[in-house]
Amino acid sequence: MFNIHNPKINSFAQRNPDNFFMVVMMVSLSIQQKWSLVGEMLSDMATNKSESIYIWGNKKNTYDYMTTHKHFMYGQMMAVINSTNLTDLAKSLSLMKIFLKVDGLGLAKAGFVCQLVAGLVGCMDVHNIKTYGVDANSLKLNKNATGKRGRENNTKKLHEYITLCHNYGTENLWNSWCSMIAEKYPKDFVDANHVSEVHYTFLTGENNV
């Protein structure tokens, strides 16, 4: 599943700033929502822009931030991805720092963006937290932290999060999550492959649910 669909999403995200924008907004719209509904939300946003009924709260903050910064962030992202001097771990760290600047994205969702644009890190969401028995408090980043201690604590949590995801395996996190969602919502998805596939078709506007 990961090996089939993730490279297609990576290529989509890396094509241009607007596609990158759509990927980040798919991640934002998925927060605390059923995965099967995200495609319709994304389509509504593409049509109605900031007036979409799904753009509210922190999602509005994310939308506004990305609208303003998508070109600059895209350039930063592609410089990291195309670097031949960085290891996957170094790329993960650099990309996470870029995506964590986005209003409304914490460790898990910044990790999801990394997974979608470059096949790195992963999303330790509420489902994966339960599956892998992860302490939810360990994933909470204080983005408003000030002072040396606050910055050091955030840096430590960032490194720990990346290590956690890579230890479980980015591909494994994707595939196991798709299998879990397919089992939990059999009326919405044919199988785990279907769950994986819509990560791409949501972005292309096909939806396919």
Image (cartoon, helix red, strand yellow):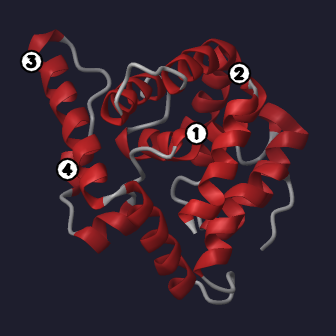
Please name which of the two marks, 2 or 1, marks the residue nearer to the observer: 1
**What secondary structure is found at the residue carrying circle 1?**
helix
Position of the C terminus, as image quadrant, is bottom right
Q: Position of residue 138 (x, y in %)?
A: 18, 47
- For label 1, the residue is 117
Q: Secondary structure at mark 2?
A: helix
Name the N-terminal-most of marks 1 and 3.
1
Numbered mark located on residue 67 in the image: 2
Q: Which residue is mark 4?
A: 137
User: Alpha carbon of mark 2 to alpha carbon of mark 1: how far?
Assistant: 18 Å
Residue 100 horizontal/vertical position (percent): 42, 28
Give the CA separation, mark 3 to mark 2.
32 Å
Label whose residue precedes the other's in the sequence (4 or 3): 4
Specify the quadrant that holds the N terminus: bottom right
The earlier-in-sequence mark between 2 and 1 is: 2
Residue under numbered circle 3: 149
Which of the two discs, 4 and 2, labels the residue nearer the N terminus?
2
Measured in 3D between alpha carbons, the distance from the residue under mark 4 to the one under mark 2, in whole angstroms, is 31 Å
Q: Amino acid at mark 4?
A: Asn
- Name the mark on residue 180: none
Q: Residues within 10 Å of mark 2 (few under 14, many from 20)?
A: some
Q: Is residue 21 visible?
A: no
Mark 3 crowd level (few <14, some 14–19, many ≥20, 10 Å Cα): few
Residue 108 appears at what percent x and percent y? 39, 47
